[in-house]
Image (cartoon, rainbow, N blue to C red):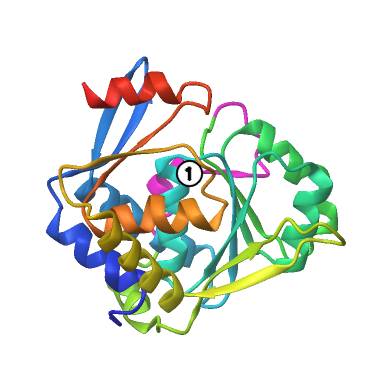
Amino acid sequence: MAPDTLNGTLAESFRRHADRTAFLRKIAGRYEPISYAQADQTVRRLASSLLDLGTQPGDRVAILSGNSPEWVYADLAALAIGASTVPIYPTLNPGQVRYILSDSESRVVFVSHRAQMEKVEQVRGELPRLENVVVFDPKDIPDSVLSLADLLEKRPGPGPEAVALRIRAVGPDDLASLIYTSGTTGEPKGVMLTHRAFSTNALTAATLFDIGPGDVALSFLPLSHVFERTAGYYAMLARGVTIAYAESVDTVPQNLLEILR
């Protein structure tokens, strides 16, 4: 696989730091760890499931969610098979969500929970290219959408060899993401960013921050923004850092104390 791709950069780090903690997420009042090996396995299984849904290189896969390990899984799984991701701020209204999904011609959208799913369902009739809605939280969802658990458990897809072939086929100048700007006039514009752009910036940031295994970062800025995605996500995982997710902006001080104990 090409070294100047996110696939190449992060796959090597996931192998090297397999036994280390990649993510800390709050469950039932305490932070629980997810290892790099566990995360890698989930990403590859999800990538295989996306292949089973018919996702092709160059397709757009949108993510409408707050920060979480699932956001990362969806992003990396899509990138692994040559698709490009379209991050959508969870604060946007249904009309704004419709515009981005339509303009990007997204075929799949991942959403965090029912409230975000309902935004998509309200405008789904206006989105002929959208084929699948996948919900991270499976509670109380209709049959018209899929859950992340369903994809991981019931749609195994073609398997690891097919995913590995796709990963190796992705090139540095392939589109990694289409990020919509919040312009002051008119509709948002989709900015095209390649694997090389993300990988180069992430590795530069990692060097400047002087980070490495044993460090812990708290993620609270939105992953839909390119800064958090590059410096707070790709750069961190490229160096074996543990990413903890804040419950909200308001809980950042408390969450910092919890992860530093």
Quadrant position of the N terminus in the picture: bottom left
The residue labelled by disc 1 is 148
What stretch of residues is rendered in magenta? 139-156
- Seen as rendered, the residue at the extreme top is 29
Q: Nearer the viewer, residue 11 or 77?
A: 11
**Residue at 34% over, 75% down:** 167
Residue shown at 44% from the left, 41% from the top: 149
Which type of secondary structure does the marked residue at label 1 adopt?
helix
> Is residue 95 rendered magenta in the image?
no
For disc 1, the neighbor class at 10 Å (few under 14, some 14 to 19, many from 20) is many
- Examine the structure image and report whether residue 155 is included in the region drawn in magenta: yes
Q: Tell me, yes or no, if residue 45 can be seen here.
A: no
For the point 48% across and 44% down, the residue is 148
Q: Is residue 114 left or right of residue 247?
A: right
Please give left or right for residue 15 compared with residue 40 in the image: left
Image coordinates for residue 82, horizontal then vertical, percent: 46, 75
Relative vertical location of residue 226 with respect to residue 172 in this rendering, above or below: above
Residue 205 position by quadrant? bottom left
Dot 1 amino acid type? Leu
Residue 185 vs 254, above or below: the answer is below
Residue 140 location (% of width, % of height): 61, 26
Q: Position of residue 87 (x, y in %)?
A: 59, 55
Direction from residue 200 to residue 62 in the image, left or right: right
- Residue 258, image x and y in percent? 30, 20
